[in-house]
Amino acid sequence: PLMIKNLIIFGTRPEAIKMAPLVKEFRKYDEFFDTKVCITAQHREMLDQVLTFFEITPDFDLDLMKPNQNLYTLTSSILSGLKTILETYKPDYVYVHGDTTTTMASSLAAFYAGAKICHVEAGLRTFNMQSPFPEEMNRSVTGVVSNIHFSPSEKSKHNLVLENKPENSIIVTGNTVIDALMFSVNKVKNSNYQDTEIEHLKSGLDTEKKLILVTGHRRENHGAGFVRICEALKEIAVDNPQTQIIYPVHLNPNVQGPVYKLLSEIDNIQLIAPLSYPAFVWLMDKSYLIITDSGGVQEEAPSLGKPVLVMRDTTERPEAVEAGTVILVGTNKDKIVDEANKLLNDAFAYKTMSKLHNPYGDGKASQRIVSYIKSKLNA
């Protein structure tokens, strides 16, 4: 064919962040590709915020977010909603990302329509269908129907080889989340960039003090785990008066309770409302150290040279632990305090960790995906 028709489908905020760089990259080559974007809007407001930031206007919008949405209604609405779009646009390639319900249902619809399916961020596995639920099933099912697997790392490629996927269908690209981060940091650091949330953050920061950014919300840490985390943060703040801790607190009451009870009185700890993606990127870039239990932050922070303490006992992203860019501290109070103090007070330890290579990629994943698909033009 003289031109390849692409349809890029996503539905949640994390998918939008990770697919935006791919949309932008394909659109640089309009002479080879006709690229359209379809959103299911499984998340609505948070999704729109990201699309505005990345300057992407969807061509198709299923607008599926409804009150009391469940997996049954969501899956069936995506399947039936995509039918018309796939039959009228007739894409050659359909791109889905990761492991959401949108990913799984869209890959199935694309399979029915006879399009070639490209899975971005393919091959992550815990090998336990119940955990994370339903994500492990979503990514596994998507892997079964996909024709091309764009894997973020050698480890994820290896998982797919073990599942008998043809080796020539798996391309290791790095993770597009790093591409998104590079674009975003450049955008929010630009002096022309206007953002009231970032202005507000700036006014509350003491530029003389080292900044520790904290995020925590995981279900498995609720209860005693959160109390230990808060006690550790309190000790770090009191031991190091020259640092400031900023903690955007998740809206879940299981998180709000212990956090406000234990931390609201401490001078150098600021508890703030959850942040938008651009404001969070800006704050990550300004921070000295990050303490988190989030998956995405483990992938992004090493590219900014920020050491990460991960408050989890296990992670499906083992590459960072092996590379040394993150340290698993669980919810062990002493371990959190010791590792934080070491990085705050030992310049050599800090420098060594912040200079390590990010195992998740170099910010060129989208370029690799596009050039691979471009090679299909002449095939």
Image: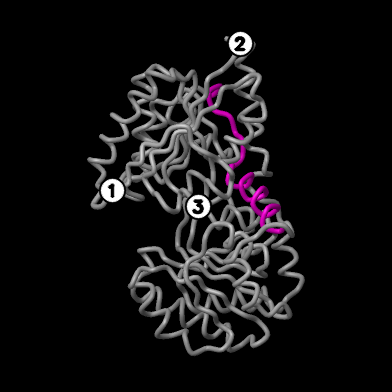
* Residue at 46% across, 63% down: 312
Horizontal arrangement in the rendering, residue 146 relative to residue 322 (left or right): left
Mark 3 falls on what kind of element? Answer: helix
Which marked residue is nearer to the observer: mark 2 or mark 3? 3
Which marked residue is nearer to the observer: mark 1 or mark 2? 1
> In terms of sequence position, does the residue under pointer 2 or pointer 3 come before the other?
2
Query: Hey, what amino acid is under mark 3?
Result: Gln
Alpha-carbon distance for marks 1 and 2? 40 Å
- Viewport quadrant of the N terminus: top right
* Residue at 58% across, 40% down: 153
Mark 2 falls on what kind of element? Answer: loop
Residue 248, how many percent across, how many down? 50, 70
- Quick one: 256 or 295, which is closer to the camera? 256
Residue 259, how many percent across, how many down? 42, 79
- Quick one: 372 or 130, which is closer to the camera? 372
Query: Hey, what amino acid is under mark 1?
Result: Lys
The range drawn in magenta is 167-189
Residue 66 numbered mark, or none = 1
Above-or-below relation of 151 to 332 = above
- Viewport quadrant of the C terminus: top right
- For disc 2, the marked residue is 2
Horizontal arrangement in the rendering, residue 248 relative to residue 30 (left or right): left
Above-or-below relation of 10 to 254 = above
Residues packed near mark 2 inside 10 Å, few (<14), some (14 to 19) or many (20 plus): few
* Residue at 68% across, 67% down: 286
The part of the image, by quadrant, that contains residue 103 is top left
Alpha-carbon distance for marks 2 and 3? 35 Å
> In terms of sequence position, does the residue under pointer 3 or pointer 1 come before the other?
3
Residues packed near mark 3 inside 10 Å, few (<14), some (14 to 19) or many (20 plus): some
Above-or-below relation of 258 to 141 = below
Horizontal arrangement in the rendering, residue 363 relative to residue 111 (left or right): right
